[in-house]
């Protein structure tokens, strides 16, 4: 092969340039689909990236869309940092949503100052509980958490369907949705005439706490050591099982908070489509953010922008809104590839075999000691 | 009772068909050291492409072929990321699933618009080569693809354990450095394994849209790809054991359909979740002895 990949650490400016370059590459790649839908790519990208920020209403809507993503992104980051591949954030989010819908029906008598913390706590615990079985199976029996968390996502959808068609079916409308939560359990609005609710502040606080935990505490150090390689961490005296358990449960809890936000801040009852895949999008957010809290926050806002933009494009140009999903997924894959190239330089050589050495840092490569 | 059991076995085979195809695909991928979480999306894409091509051309088999080609393309995309670039396999695979799901839905809307009634085709019919057999006859009333899927199990076993290529696949999944030192082209073997894997996953998807349903719907795969991932662990990376796992899952699934109609006072969602819960329980019992390919999830780079 005449192409040679050499190890060559990238200058700092490239680390910042990569996400921007990934966005450009993504939009070039997906332009094909826009043209197929008989629309102009430039016009589409205007509606995707600029239009949502040009009015107050839609700019706030970007923050609304980002709120669950900040939380699911944080949940994924927490688990992935410790090398625990929690793919079950989607199910854990629904567990939190069930708890919020349930507590919202019974906590009506309490003043909001008591009811709201109880809702958040209940959602956190519910998410944790749904994350408990795979975490224990992993720690006690060394059973792959990817498989179990994925399967539990499917189980959760059936559970929600059962709850909504059975015990909690709205007696008034007969629709498969739970009764409205009591007014005192609704998360207060941050801005009048918008859907932006207290959950956004909670999400930002969680991101800040995540940053503090990961970079300023011994728990964070242990988590990152475990994530880099379990054997090495064990050798260095880290209680790997305990660290993994903490990371898995905290991740589930944070995912549960996202569910509380959607029920108590947006929909006010449980519906089966409370999450259009926020848990999976959280994996995109965490990866784009390179598992760094600040990066995760920026990625969540950007994906929120794309989510809002996809609907704007669809309304304005008649392009199917699924374009948003394609753009997000392409962005994920392009970024993944580019992060790996970050520390390598591709050079064309006359003869000889391609070679490369060393490891790319960050999210790309990670030892998964089995 | 006899009729009940015979019907159950026949249904189990039908339910198991896409699982067998998908799991054999994932098996090639994992045996070569790559966990392919793109399976759910690849099956979805296969179901979609198969349907569109069959609907446009009027040929079901052309649809199946197109689904296989689409699956191979998806496998090659996975190998670009996970083999060539050595990217994180969990994230690459899930990214591919998200991409192919979004792409299929986008294209479906563009091609068929927002219709109230979904487009449909005349699907594959069942064949009954041994229909004359007493009692057991109805078991053999199956789609041709079901026979092919079951037949592929010994073929996969033979390829993995009795051919030079299979030896190379297992070698790069266990110890790529040693395989490389022995002159095996690790990258090539992994590309080929992922291509085979993708092709089988695409075929699995097309079974659902072209045989079972005769249509394409948004919930057509409904987590079957994830079930395949579980069946691999369950079957301990062995194609024959995997077949039993797929039939067991198919049996539990077919049983829940029948139990629902008996008027048992349990919610039907419980029965729907039953195969998944059984699988998790099975993993908890069998998973301890899981024999993971040693190089699974570890990207290989030449030093």
Image: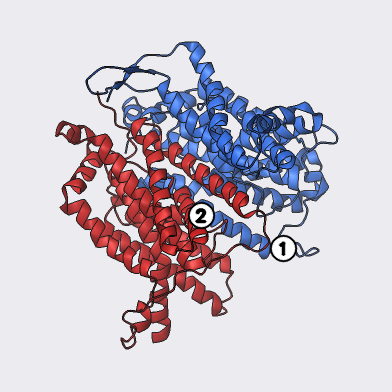
Q: Residue at x 78, y 65 (%)?
A: A171
What is the basis of the colouring in this image?
A: by chain
CB under 8 Å between discs 2 and 1? no
Q: Is residue A61 left or right of residue A127?
A: right
Which of the pair B56/A308 is nearer the observer?
B56
Kindly state the secondary structure of the residue where label 2 is placed. Answer: helix
Q: Dot 2: within a 10 Å radius of its alpha carbon, few (fewer than 14), some, or many (20 or more) residues?
A: many
Q: Report in which chain the residue with disc 1 lies.
A: A
Question: Can residue A262 be seen at all in this image of the molecule?
Answer: yes
Q: In this figure, which residue is indicated by the disc labeled 1?
A: A169
Q: Is residue B268 left or right of residue A232?
A: right
**Residue A178 vertical placement versus A264 (above, below):** below
Which type of secondary structure does the marked residue at label 1 adopt?
loop
Which hue belongs to chain A?
blue
Q: Position of residue A287 (x, y in %)?
A: 51, 31
Q: Position of residue B217 (x, y in %)?
A: 57, 59
Q: Say which mark, if any, is on residue B48.
A: 2
Of the two numbered discs 2 and 1 in the rendering, the one whose residue sits closer to the viewer: 2
Quadrant for the C terminus of chain B, please.
top left
Mark 2–mark 1 Cα distance, whole angstroms, equals 34 Å
Q: Quadrant of residue A82?
A: top left
Badge 1 density bin: few <14, some 14–19, many ≥20, Cα 10 Å: many
Instruction: Judge whether A180 appears above or below B248 on screen.
Output: above
In this rendering, position of residue B126 left or right of residue B151 = right
Colour of chain B in the image: red
């Amino acid at each position: 092969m005449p192409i040679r990949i050499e190890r060559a650490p990238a200058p700092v400016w490239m680390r910042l340039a990569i996400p921007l370059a990934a966005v450009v590459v993504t939009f070039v790649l997906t332009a094909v689909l826009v043209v197929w839908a008989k629309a102009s790519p430039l016009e589409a990208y205007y509606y995707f990236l600029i239009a949502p920020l040009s009015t107050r209403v839609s700019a706030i809507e970007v923050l609304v869309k980002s709120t669950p993503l900040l939380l699911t992104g944080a949940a994924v980051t927490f688990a992935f940092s410790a090398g625990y591949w929690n793919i079950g954030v989607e199910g854990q989010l629904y567990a939190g949503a069930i708890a919020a819908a349930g507590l919202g029906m019974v906590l009506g008598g309490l003043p909001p100052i008591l009811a709201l913390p109880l809702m958040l706590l209940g959602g956190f615990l519910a998410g944790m509980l749904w994350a408990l079985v795979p975490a224990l199976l992993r720690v006690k029996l060394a059973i792959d958490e990817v498989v179990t968390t994925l399967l539990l996502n499917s189980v959760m959808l059936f559970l929600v369907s059962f709850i909504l068609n059975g015990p909690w079916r709205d007696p008034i409308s007969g629709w498969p949705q739970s009764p409205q939560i009591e007014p005192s359990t609704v998360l207060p609005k941050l801005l009048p005439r918008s859907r932006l609710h207290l959950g956004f502040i909670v999400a930002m606080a969680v991101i800040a706490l995540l940053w503090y935990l990961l970079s300023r505490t011994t728990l964070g150090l242990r988590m990152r050591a475990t994530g880099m390689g379990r054997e090495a961490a064990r050798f260095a005296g880290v209680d790997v099982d305990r660290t993994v358990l903490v990371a898995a449960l905290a991740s589930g809890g944070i995912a549960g908070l996202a569910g509380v936000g959607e029920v108590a801040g947006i929909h006010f009852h449980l519906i089966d489509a409370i999450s259009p895949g926020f848990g999976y999008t959280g994996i995109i957010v965490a990866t784009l953010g390179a598992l760094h809290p600040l990066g995760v926050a920026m990625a969540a806002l950007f994906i929120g922008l794309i989510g809002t933009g996809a609907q704007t494009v669809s309304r304005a140009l008649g392009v199917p809104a699924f374009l948003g999903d394609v753009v997000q997924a392409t962005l994920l894959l392009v970024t993944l590839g580019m992060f790996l190239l970050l520390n390598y330089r591709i050079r064309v050589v006359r003869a000889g075999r391609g070679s490369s050495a060393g490891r790319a840092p960050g999210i790309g490569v990670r030892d998964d000691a089995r | 009772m006899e009729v009940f059991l015979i019907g159950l076995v026949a249904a189990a085979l039908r339910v198991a068909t896409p699982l067998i195809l998908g799991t054999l695909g994932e098996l090639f991928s994992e045996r070569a050291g790559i966990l392919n979480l793109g399976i759910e999306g690849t099956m979805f894409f296969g179901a979609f492409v198969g349907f569109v091509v069959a609907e446009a051309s009027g040929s079901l088999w052309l649809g199946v072929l197109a689904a296989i080609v689409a699956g191979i393309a998806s496998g090659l995309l996975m190998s670009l990321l996970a083999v060539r670039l050595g990217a994180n396999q969990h994230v690459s695979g899930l990214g591919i699933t998200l991409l192919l799901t979004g792409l299929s839905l986008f294209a479906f809307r563009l091609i068929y618009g927002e219709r109230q009634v979904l487009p449909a085709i005349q699907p594959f019919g069942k064949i009954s080569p041994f229909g004359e057999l007493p009692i057991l006859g109805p078991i053999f009333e199956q789609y041709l693809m079901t026979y092919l899927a079951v037949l592929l199990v010994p073929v996969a076993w033979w390829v993995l354990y009795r051919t030079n290529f299979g030896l190379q696949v297992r070698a790069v999944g266990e110890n790529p450095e040693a395989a490389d030192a022995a002159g095996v082209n690790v990258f090539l073997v992994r590309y080929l394994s992922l291509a085979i894997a993708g092709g089988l996953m695409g075929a699995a998807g097309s079974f659902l849209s072209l045989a079972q349903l005769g249509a394409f719907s948004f919930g057509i795969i409904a987590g079957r790809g994830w079930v395949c991932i579980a069946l691999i662990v369950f079957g301990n990376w062995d194609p024959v054991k995997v077949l039993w796992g797929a039939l067991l899952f198919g049996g539990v699934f077919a049983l829940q359909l029948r139990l629902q109609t008996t008027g048992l006072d349990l919610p039907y969602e419980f029965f729907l979740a039953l195969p998944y819960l059984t699988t998790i329980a099975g993993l908890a019992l069998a998973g301890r002895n899981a024999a993971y390919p040693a190089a699974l999830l570890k990207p290989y780079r030449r030093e």
